[in-house]
Amino acid sequence: MPSNGNATVTPNQPWTQDGTASVSPIPPFPESGPRVMPLDNRPAGSLTVRRSTYPLGIVLIPTGSEPSVSPAVLPIIASSGNQVSVTGDNYVEFPDGFVVWFLAK
């Protein structure tokens, strides 16, 4: 799954801890406003990210492979749908983590 852009991501706690992050898309991206999203450290694997659970999206950071700087530029997987299927391949393609961003409807 290719990225749809990039975002500057600033965690509100150390990268190794779950919490929240400020996420600002970098132009050109169809939406420009920053968002505060959940940040989740998790082992690589399959996951369905649902809009009903994460209305704005989520920052996913592979356990043990966190970004070395803060803020970090991470790729965005954008969707106008109700869910995004994440696979282990996404963690290989984006080893420092990535953002699932639900576009405004």
Image: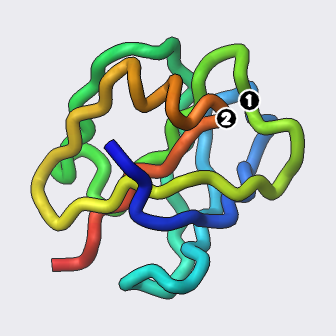
Q: Residues within 10 Å of mark 1 (few under 14, many from 20)?
A: some
Question: What element does badge 2 sit on?
Answer: loop
Question: What element does badge 1 sit on?
Answer: loop
Residue under numbered circle 2: 96
Mark 2–mark 1 distance (CA, rounded to whole Å): 5 Å
- By what rule are the colours in the image chosen? rainbow
Location of residue 9 with respect to 83 vertically, above or below: below
Give the amino acid at mark 2.
Asp
Residue at the (40%, 63%) spot, across then down: 4
Location of residue 22 with respect to 86 vertically, above or below: below
Q: Residues within 10 Å of mark 2 (few under 14, many from 20)?
A: many
Quadrant housing residue 65: top right
Q: Are marks 2 and 1 in contact (CB under 8 Å)?
A: yes
Residue at the (85%, 51%) spot, across then down: 70
For the C terminus, give its image quadrant: bottom left
Q: Earlier in the sequence, mark 2 or mark 1?
A: 1
Residue under numbered circle 1: 66
Give the amino acid at mark 1.
Glu
Is 80 left, or right, of 47 in this rendering? left
Is 89 left, or right, of 66 in this rendering? left
